[in-house]
Amino acid sequence: MTEYKPDFAAAFRCLASACPDSCCRQGWQIVIDPEHAAQYAALSGELGSRVRAAMTQTDGEATFAMDGGVCRLLDASGLCPIVSAMGEEGLCHICHTHPRFLEEYGATREIHFSLSCPEAARLALDRTNPIRFVRVQTDEPLDHPNSIDPAQYFALLAVRRLAVRLMQDRTLPISDRFVLLLRLAEQVQRRFDRKDYSACRRLVRRWYGYDYRMRQFAKTLRGRLRRAPYAEDLALLCAMEHLTPEMTELLPRLAETAEGASAFDAAFSLQAEHLAVLWLWHYLPKAVNDNDAAGKMKLAVFGWRFVRRACLCMKKTTLSDVQHYAGLFAKEVEHSEENLNLFYRASKRI
Ligand code: SF4
């Protein structure tokens, strides 16, 4: 199997009890896979009794119970006794992989990091060099048959390479890069709607030409993408299910006037670039499921507008604020299939 992961993956270490916003304190439902549920049921001694006392059943599945949103297993110093006694290998599948998300496309596995994890957000955003993705060949056999359409999938990979290149072109201001991304999204989707993936790959080749790109830019500035669509973003955020108390408190503030978007973009252009690249890398290939490539590209624009607006309205303008609101976007939008789908449906109008 071929595996792709971001270049900071190897540096990731869970902060455990030192984490300022631990995933064990979010009130998330942690479903224990059957293999580990059986292992925990057979654990002897004090650890076994403790683990079983923290387990419960939710909708017929074994889960860890939460007390006030905190995993019942955590000890007074915020450590997980399973890790203390057995190492990370003893963790159930969800706890072991978090904050990583694994996506499989045929014989390829992609590993993405959720920026809801403060350490992943720090590694991803507190850097100047462009994010690269590392390819590793593993000897793991392929266990799922490949059911994706190769023409569509390879067109998506070609679009993703180009989109990442556009977002990492530091000769242009970040706002211009987003304008180009939206233009590309529209053109790609027209070909995807016709299922003409060869035409899409020809389009991608044209976009590598500087003159062609600049013509697209000029046309876009004359067109509708120039207007500021923030009211639409806000209506959409209000219509979503809200998963954290912070979001409920933040939403009314987001409606307030927020000046300084251009200065903010200039100050945090590296973070805007890194976020867009991570979102494009994660979500674009998922268009194999719904053929909506444009929606996945617009998510990167929507995500950055959210982070910027939240920082400006809350008058929080440090790098750690950007990391925090990128994490909130992950918790509120990326972790919710329902919210993502609501965005994709609405994005056709944006
Ligand atoms: S959020 Fe990240 S760093 Fe914090 S406890 Fe969870 S995995 Fe570890």
Image (spheres, rainbow, N blue to C red):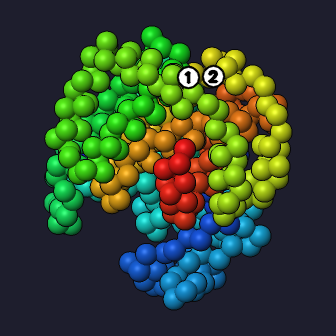
Marker disc for residue 175: 1
Task: Name the quadrant containing residue 157.
Answer: top left
Instruction: Confirm whether residue 69 shows in the render.
Output: yes
Mark 2: few/some/many CA within 10 Å (<14, 14-19, 20+):
some
Task: Report helix, strand or loop for mark 1.
Answer: helix
Q: Considering only vertical position in the picture, is 307 above or below 331? A: above
Q: Which residue is drawn at 59% across and 71% down?
A: 29
In the rendered image, residue 266, in percent from the top left (x then y), is placed at: 63, 17
Determine whether, in the image, residue 261 is placed left or right of residue 4.
Answer: right
Mark 1: few/some/many CA within 10 Å (<14, 14-19, 20+):
some
Instruction: Confirm whether residue 19 shows in the render.
Output: no
Kindly tell me whether mark 1's CB lies below 8 Å from ligand 1.
Answer: no
- The amino acid on which the numbered mark 2 sits, given as a three-letter code, is Asp
Q: Name the residue under label 2.
A: 265
Residue sitting farthest toward the bottom: 60
In the rendered image, residue 344, in percent from the top left (x then y), is placed at: 49, 54
Q: Earlier in the sequence, mark 1 or mark 2?
A: 1
Q: Considering only vertical position in the picture, is 75 above or below 11? A: below
**Disc 1 versus disc 2: distance between alpha carbons?**
7 Å
Along the viewing direction, whichever of 340 and 101 lies nearer the viewer? 340
Q: Considering only vertical position in the picture, is 257 above or below 222? A: below
